[in-house]
Image (cartoon, coloured by chain):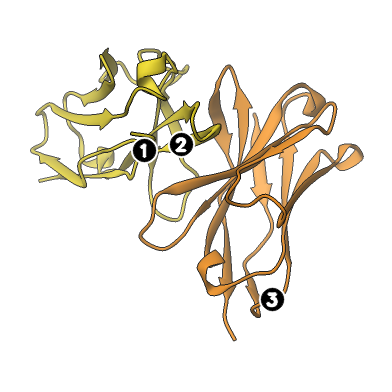
Amino acid sequence: QVQLVQSGAEVKKPGASVKVSCKTSGYTFTKYAIHWMRQAPGQRLEWMGWINSGTSNTKFSQSFQGRVTISTDTSASTVYLELSSLTSEDTGVFYCALFRDAYYTTWGQGTQVTVSA
Amino acid sequence: QSLLTQPPSVSGAPGQRVTISCTGGSSNIGSGYDVNWYQHLPGTAPKALIYANFNRPSGVPERFTGSKSGTSVSLAISGLQAEDEADYFCQSYDTSLTAFIFGGGTKLTVL
């Protein structure tokens, strides 16, 4: 079955960068896009961006433009999210999700990122 | 409005029916963009319940139904069960923000 397994929790200092991985399995990796979302404590989910896993084309939310990079390792069926210039407001749970048939069919389990001095 | 608005909480007794609304605006639901619904238990991966306003993915019980009227959509859960206690959120696309958007989530309590 389709699975998205994310890397473990991270603790970072303000100004640092974080890289979260999303390892996929159970489908043809290059056929579908992967999206990334962030959920800050007590806040709604916020869409960050997506990558076409076949072409590596990306699109980002204006809220994160300039600070976010999404990339793939096709040989490992893995997608990466990198967020730079972290502040305390970036603390939250980051999710990857498979976008298929115009909805998020499968989600990762989430990765807690804590930004603290 | 470019946001999706949900009630913070709803509740119902086992066996009852509850509905959760998701209200958007002219730049998202009103522009014809579909709404999807997800169930989320804290600490787990969200699960798709309804896609394109009305459709259930394979394996989702018929107790979960979606409807749409104007710039609002609703998720109805009938025959409430204890295992339905979770957070539910809606999701769509906004053409003004050129971004995928989410509702604030509704916590369902089964009394």
Residue in the picture at 26% in, 22% down? B72
Q: CA distance from mark 2 to mark 1?
A: 7 Å
Viewport quadrant of the N terminus of chain B:
top left
Chain drawn yellow in the picture: B
Where is residue A55 shown, x and y percent of the image? 85, 27
Q: Colour of chain A?
A: orange
Splitting the image into 4 quarters, where does residue A15 fall?
bottom right
Q: Amino acid at mark 2?
A: Ile
Q: Which residue is label 1 attached to? A: B3
Q: Amino acid at mark 1?
A: Leu
Crowding at dot 3, Cα within 10 Å, few <14 / some 14-19 / many 20+, comes out as few
Q: Residue furthest right?
A: A75
Q: Is residue A48 above or below residue B28?
A: below
Residue B101, label in figure: 2
Q: Amino acid at mark 3?
A: Gly
Q: CA distance from mark 3 to mark 1?
A: 30 Å
- Whether residues under marks 2 and 1 lie with C-beta atoms below 8 angstroms apart, the answer is yes
Q: Residue furthest front?
A: B96
Pointer 3 chain: A
Tag 1 secondary structure: loop
Q: Is residue A35 left or right of residue B94?
A: right
Splitting the image into 4 quarters, where does residue B26 fall?
top left
Question: Same chain for marks 3 and 1?
Answer: no
Q: Is residue A68 left or right of residue B95?
A: right
Q: CA distance from mark 2 to mark 3?
A: 27 Å
Q: Nearer the viewer, residue A76 or A113?
A: A113
Q: Is residue B108 left or right of residue A10?
A: left
